[in-house]
């Protein structure tokens, strides 16, 4: 849980400017005391001053160090997954290759990764099986609703925030790291 709280705070700090400690506490669903303690830790590392981010690049690198890759996900083989996502009313956000391709078109979108809410897991499974096959494939569903913070819509598709996308691309490695570096310059 501690890691999740820290990641939620980092996600908010990198997505928003000039928030009070109370506002950060509300948005992250963490106690004000927890926010204050973590901000002090970040201040000692000279990453923030009060609630203001001093160096976004270094703060993102810090997040990358403490970030845990998702261990649980489901994979499916679905024909034209983006068309399916445009039609669904289920809550999701795209990340990695497809999200990067919508923003800067550097990577070939070899896989479609989406974050979903835990309570929607079975609805997504039924939708994917109805429209494709279950098992190793071109669609990966990851349960993490925190990653939906500051989602945005591009071309009728929901994508993660820029800081979240950068973290996810760095975790992919290889060419995705290059794309993450390019996005980092835009942050």
Image (tube, helix red, strand yellow):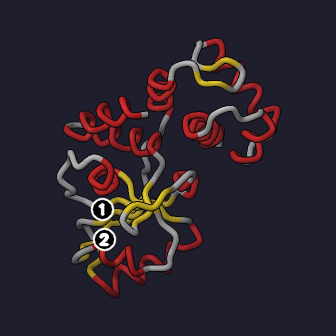
User: As rendered, which of 65 and 180 lies closer to the eye?
Assistant: 180
Whether residues under marks 1 and 2 lie with C-beta atoms below 8 angstroms apart, the answer is yes
**In the image, is residue 81 above or below residue 51?**
below
Residue 98 coordinates in the image, percent (x, y): 29, 57
Location of residue 73 by image quarter = bottom left
Location of residue 51 by image quarter = top right
Q: Earlier in the sequence, mark 1 or mark 2?
A: 2
Location of residue 28 by image quarter = top right
**From the viewer's perspective, is 25 left or right of 156?**
right
Q: Which residue occupies 50% across, 31% down?
A: 63
Q: Which residue occupies 25% across, 76% down?
A: 78
**From the viewer's perspective, is 38 left or right of 11?**
right
Viewer-side label of 1, 2: 2
- Which disc number belongs to residue 82? 2
Gap between marks 1 and 2, in whole Å? 8 Å
Q: Which residue occupies 29% across, 73% down?
A: 81
Q: Quadrant of the N terminus?
A: top right
Q: Quadrant of the C terminus?
A: top left
Q: Which residue is mark 1?
A: 112
**From the viewer's perspective, is 170 left or right of 58?**
left
Crowding at dot 2, Cα within 10 Å, few <14 / some 14-19 / many 20+, comes out as: some
Please tell me whether mark 2 sits on a helix, a strand or a loop.
helix
Crowding at dot 1, Cα within 10 Å, few <14 / some 14-19 / many 20+, comes out as: many
Residue 151 coordinates in the image, percent (x, y): 51, 55
**In the image, is residue 145 above or below residue 63?**
below
Residue 17 coordinates in the image, percent (x, y): 63, 34
């Amino acid at each position: 849980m501690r890691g999740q709280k820290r990641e939620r705070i980092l996600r908010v700090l990198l997505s928003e400017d000039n928030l009070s400690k109370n506002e950060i506490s509300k948005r992250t669903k963490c106690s004000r005391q927890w926010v204050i303690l973590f901000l002090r830790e970040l201040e000692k590392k000279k990453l923030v001053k009060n609630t203001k981010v001093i160096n976004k690049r270094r703060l993102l690198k810090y997040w990358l160090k403490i970030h845990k890759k998702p261990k649980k996900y489901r994979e499916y083989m679905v024909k034209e997954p983006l068309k399916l996502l445009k039609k669904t009313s289920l809550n999701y956000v795209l990340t990695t290759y497809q999200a990067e391709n919508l923003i800067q078109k550097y990577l070939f979108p070899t896989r479609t990764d989406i974050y979903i809410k835990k309570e929607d897991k079975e609805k997504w499974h039924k939708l994917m099986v109805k429209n494709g096959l279950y098992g190793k494939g071109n669609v990966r569903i990851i349960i993490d609703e925190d990653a939906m913070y500051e989602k945005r819509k591009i071309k009728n598709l929901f994508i993660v925030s820029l800081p979240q996308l950068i973290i996810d691309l760095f975790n992919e490695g290889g060419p995705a790291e290059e794309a993450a570096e390019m996005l980092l310059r835009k942050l």
